[in-house]
């Protein structure tokens, strides 16, 4: 059974970089046909898709965040990562990693709360 | 970006009721629409994909409908465990976008 688990800093200072990692278990991140996504959820903006990365390195970023986001994948550790730079209070949210395909986003990790505050 | 407008944003219903949630897309999405259920403190769970197809393991009281750019999620005979927030998502074009959510509460 595929499972995803987010980890990383829960508190980030304004203007610094948020860093999160998603560990994938139960299947290889190199399995064909899937991409690996980051999605966030905040009270003010609801669910917002951040972007996806393929095991081969192909990437798509949401244009609204593109200038600040970097996604990467580590096939040897079966994990993928998110970096979001120059954070502000508006980036405070629960961040989810998930497996994505042409037809759905499933499953999702349990989510991790990241608070931006000094 | 494709906008998804969900209605209603809040719904009060009783156990055993049948409820319908609507999701309207701002342009055609060729049926690439998914529905998710989210309970407090939990991640969204996939219910339906490609507008009509029930995800494995999801009870048959959940069903999806499609008419042009209007999509529906119907829950027949609402059960206590169905009280949650529901979201639609379009996967036809990037960036992927979500509806604003519909919270289903117990009357």
Image (cartoon, rainbow, N blue to C red):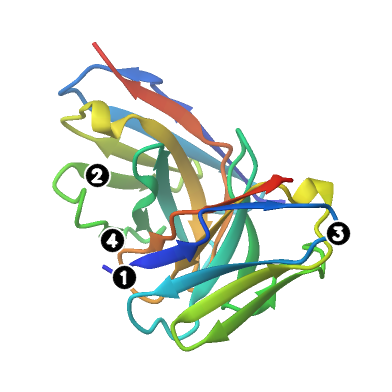
Decide if residue A52 is on the left or right side of residue B18: left
State yes or no: discs 3 and 2 in contact (Cβ < 8 Å).
Answer: no
Mark 1 or 4: the one toward you: 1
Q: Position of residue B38 (x, y in %)?
A: 61, 47
**In screen coordinates, is A50 left or right of B60?**
left
* Pointer 2 local density, CA inside 10 Å: few below 14, some 14–19, many at least 20: some
| Residue under numbered circle 2 | A70
**Which residue occupies 40% across, 76% down?**
B92
Q: Given the image, what chain letter belongs to the residue carrying mark 1?
A: B
Location of residue B83 with respect to A102 vertically, above or below: above
Residue at numbered disc 3: B16
Residue identified by numbered label 1? B2
Q: Earlier in the sequence, mark 3 or mark 1?
A: 1
Gap between marks 3 and 4 measured at Cα: 43 Å
* Secondary structure beneath label 2: strand
First in residue order: circle 4 vs circle 2 = 4
Q: Residue at x 51, y 73 (%)?
A: B33
Identify residue for label 4: A60
Residue B24 position in % (x across, y down): 44, 73
- Residue at 28%, 61% in the rendered image: A60
Same-subunit check for callouts 1 and 4? no
Q: Which mark is residue A7?
A: none
As helix, strand or loop, the secondary structure at mark 1 comes to: loop
């Amino acid at each position: 059974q595929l499972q995803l688990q987010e980890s990383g800093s829960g508190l980030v200072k304004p203007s610094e970089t948020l860093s999160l990692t998603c560990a994938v278990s139960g299947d290889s991140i190199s399995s064909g046909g899937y991409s690996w996504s980051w999605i966030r959820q905040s009270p003010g903006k609801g669910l917002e898709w951040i972007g996806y990365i393929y095991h081969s390195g192909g990437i798509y970023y949401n244009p609204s965040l593109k200038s600040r986001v970097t996604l990467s994948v580590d096939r040897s550790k079966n994990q993928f990562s998110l970096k979001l730079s120059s954070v502000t209070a508006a980036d405070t949210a629960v961040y989810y990693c998930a497996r994505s395909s042409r037809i759905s986003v499933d499953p999702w990790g349990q989510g991790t709360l990241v608070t931006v505050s000094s | 970006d494709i906008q998804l407008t969900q209605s209603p944003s809040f719904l009060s219903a009783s156990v055993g009721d049948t409820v319908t949630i609507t999701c309207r897309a701002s342009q055609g999405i060729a049926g690439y629409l998914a529905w998710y259920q989210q309970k407090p403190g939990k991640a969204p769970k996939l219910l339906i994909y490609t507008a009509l197809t029930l995800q494995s393991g999801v009870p048959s009281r959940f069903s999806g409908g499609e008419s042009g750019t209007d999509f529906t999620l119907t829950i027949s005979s609402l059960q206590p465990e169905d009280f949650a927030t529901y979201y639609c998502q379009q996967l036809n074009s990037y960036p992927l976008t979500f509806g604003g959510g519909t919270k289903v509460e117990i009357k």
